Amino acid sequence: MSDIKVCYRCKEAKDINLFSKNAKKKDGIACECKVCFSLMYKAYRSNNKEKLRENAVMYAEKNKENISVYKKQWRTDNIDHLKLLNATWKKDNVSRVRATNAERKARKIKATPTWNNKDFVDGIYEVAVLFSSIGLDVHVDHIVPLKSKKVCGLHNDHNLRVTTAAENLSKNNLHWPDMW
């Protein structure tokens, strides 16, 4: 087999390393070079945006469960990478992090009833700190989320619990016990 091949599109003789593999071809190498294929595919994508979007939506609907399982497994397998990305993003977006934290504090204040048992709430946070001090990755979770499309919970002793960080983050403000 030769180390040079002529690209079907640009008609230039190029090294075979500049061509993708294609098992369907006699020589096992694609007809067009990687540069020409990239240009061709980029043009296709720009000319068929709506069709590609519809196909992606249909695929996502058809494979909702498989996608969910895959994403959950990927997050589990790449937790350290995600933590690094998150820390980097927070470092690069300090003002947005501060704005989000301020918004959450304001929501918490609005969601705290006057009859709240502050000592009990403080105790829950102390338990979480103790668990964290022995190396456990825990969060204080609002059982019913403070902000959700369906319902908003209260920041009080009846709506708080200490749970694993993974379980709390998997909820995404979308789930709580006895959800209809």
Image: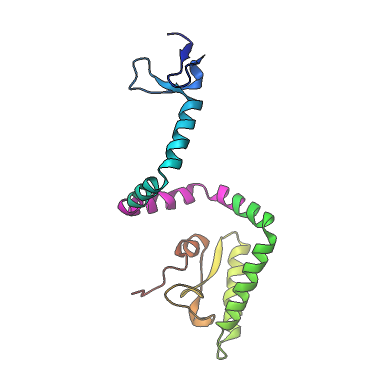
Q: Residue at x 47, y 16 (%)?
A: 11
Whether 62 is among the magenta residues is yes
Any part of residue 4 in sight: yes
Magenta stretch bounds = 60-84
Q: Residue at x 49, y 59 (%)?
A: 166
Any part of residue 126 in sight: no
Q: Position of residue 29 (x, y in %)?
A: 41, 19
Q: Quadrant of the C terminus?
A: bottom left
Residue lying at the far left of the rendered structure: 62
Give the camera-side residue of 108 and 121. Answer: 108
Give the camera-side residue of 65 and 79. Answer: 65
Whether 32 is among the magenta residues is no
Q: Quadrant of the N terminus?
A: top left
Q: How many marks?
A: 0
Residue lying at the far front of the rendered structure: 47
Give the camera-side residue of 17 and 104. Answer: 17
Q: Position of residue 6 (x, y in %)?
A: 46, 14
Q: Position of residue 139 (x, y in %)?
A: 55, 66
Give the camera-side residue of 129 and 10. Answer: 10
Main secondary structure type of the part rendered in magenta: helix
Residue lying at the far top of the rendered structure: 2
Q: Residue at x 58, y 78 (%)?
A: 108
